[in-house]
Amino acid sequence: MISPALRGALTDQSELLPLRELPVEAARLLDVLHAPPRLAAHLRLVHDVAAALTVALERRYPDLAFDRVAVLFGAATHDITSQPATPCCSPTTYPTDSPASLAPTAPGRPRTGPSTTCS
């Protein structure tokens, strides 16, 4: 269950600084890893800036080909690896998979994920 502090970091809105919410899979990954709320708030801010930049790029360079979803997911998860492993997601829990394998896959490609889930 997501902590109230993490939920606030992921969803709270401010009139002065309205931010987009993180992709659902990124928020789920933060919850599974018991990420600190400060990290979630940072990732949400970076994700929001990346979203604004991708919109500007699409307008300014309409022929530029890039994967907007991948850019936004990368922005939403870029610092997660700097967090220490939690007992729930230790190498013994994920013998062949890493938390990064929870990332969305391209349409038509099978998803690989952990053999067990954290509770």
Image: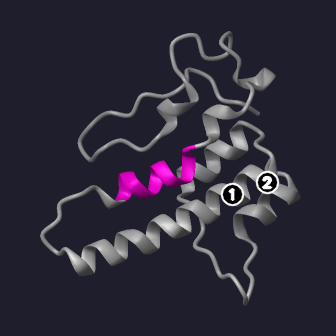
Q: Quadrant of residue 43?
A: bottom right
| Residue displayed at 12% across by 70% down | 63
In the rendered image, the vertical position of residue 26 relative to residue 21, given as above or below: above
Q: Residue furthest right?
A: 4
Answer left or right for 53 relative to 81.
left
Residue 5 in percent (x, y) is at 86, 58
Where does the image place residue 30, in percent across and percent down from the top left?
68, 45
Q: Which residues are magenta?
A: 69-78
Three-letter amino acid code at the position of disc 1: His
Most extreme residue toward the left is 63
Secondary structure of residue under mark 1: helix
Q: Please give the residue where the numbered disc 1 appears in the rendered image.
A: 42
Is residue 53 inside the magenta stretch?
A: no
- Quarter of the image containing the C terminus? top right
Report x, y in % for residue 33.
Answer: 71, 36
Note whether 51 is above or below 4 in the view shown: below
Q: Is residue 74 left or right of residue 18?
A: left
- Per the image, the residue denoted by label 2 is 38
Residue 57 versus residue 29: which sits nearer the camera? 57
Assess disc 1: are there few (<14), some (14-19) or many (≥20) residues with their C-alpha within 10 Å of its C-alpha.
some
Q: Is residue 68 above or below residue 60?
A: above
Q: Label the magenta part by its dominant secondary structure.
A: helix
Residue sitting at 54 percent across and 62 percent down? 47
Report if the CB atoms under discs 2 and 1 are less than 8 Å apart: yes
Residue found at x 61% / y 17%: 94
9 with respect to 56 (left or right): right
Q: Amino acid at mark 2?
A: Arg
SS for dot 2: helix
Q: CA distance from mark 2 to mark 1?
A: 6 Å
